[in-house]
Image: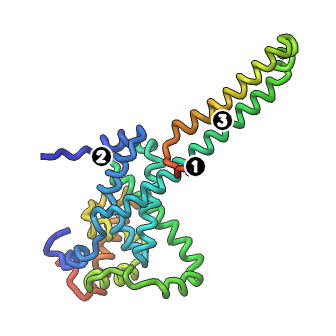
Amino acid sequence: MDKTDPLADFFAADTAPSVDRAFRTGVMERVARQRLRIELVLRLVVGCLLVLGLALMSPALQSLAGVLGQDMSTVLQVIAIAGGIAFLGHGWLTRTIRLPRVHLF
Amino acid sequence: MSSQPTDAALVAAARSGNDAAYARIVDRYQGAIRAFLRRLSPYDADADDLAQEAFLTGWAELRGLRDPDRLKTWLFSIAWRKAKGQARTMARSRQRDHDWQAMRPETETPQTEHAIALRQALVQLPPDQCAAVSLCLGEGWSHGDAAKVLELPLGTVKSHVLRGRARLAEILGVGDGQD
């Protein structure tokens, strides 16, 4: 705006802080919360797909377990449980938001 | 001499998940966007909340930004859409808000006499005109850039600025600088 413009003084007096750390922190907190929501939804979807896949495959898995016998069936269960734990562990280790530490003792 | 990263560089970094880059984008444009929204909203706290929402939407939609060099215009467009949405919401609940707003602290209002007078004058302009005046007279934007942000024809923006300037000058009791 032209410096000789009589309205210039009014607009010059009405400004917001150029850099406000509290404002920036507020924005980045909202960003972190949004990212967490997106991650939770994605993991929920992946988890549901895994469960659905296992449910669809269960007849084949049961027949396979019958063929392999009791010992191998136990091994398959251990592998499935380990896979589930690995999925949860991957989610925990690759999380992008800091969660409060839980002190049990 | 310290070289400031360009908007395009910050956008590229933010798109790859670099939160520090997005924080720098926020720092770079928060002053202008907050000032713009404060002129459209009766209360600074509401305007700042809206500005935070605008930056959050900007973060979420960053991949949709075609030309990173137009980041500033794009962020202002988001802010303007938010302001219009809030204006509709407030129109519906104006009576409900009235009592609450009357109880709010006066520290949320601008401090200087000039700023107070300007805000009171801007309130009397229609929202589109107020936004055009805020961008072109307050932020020094060209009519063309303001037209893109406000999604209005160029002629309409020019008309809004001309009429808004005259109206403000009349309310504030100063010449409109167009003589």
The residue lying furthest to the left in this view is B1
Q: Residue at x 75, y 33 (%)?
A: A51
Going by the numbered disc 3, the residue's amino acid type is: Val
Q: CA–CA distance between discs 2 and 3?
A: 35 Å
Chain that bears disc 2:
B
Q: Residues within 10 Å of mark 3 (few under 14, many from 20)?
A: few
Circle 1 residue: A37
x and y percentages locating residue B20 in the rendered image: 35, 47
Task: Please provide percent x and percent y for residue B77.
Answer: 41, 57
Q: Residue at x 59, y 34 (%)?
A: A89
Callout in the foreground (1, 2): 1
Distance (Cα) linking label 3 and label 1: 14 Å
The image quadrant where one finds the N terminus of chain A is bottom left
Secondary element under disc 1, as helix, strand or loop, is: helix
Label number found at residue B7: 2
**Element class at badge 2:** helix
Q: Which mark is residue A46?
A: 3
Q: Residue at (41%, 44%) from the top-left corner? A: B65
Q: Are marks 1 and 2 in contact (CB under 8 Å)?
A: no
Between marks 2 and 3 in the image, the one whose residue lies nearer the viewer: 3
Q: Looking at the image, what colour scheme do you see?
A: rainbow
Query: Which badge, 3 or 1, is on the more N-terminal residue?
Result: 1
Q: Are marks 2 and 3 in contact (CB under 8 Å)?
A: no
In the rendered image, the vertical position of residue B123 relative to residue A89, given as above or below: below
- Answer left or right for B145 relative to A36: left
Chain of the residue under label 3: A
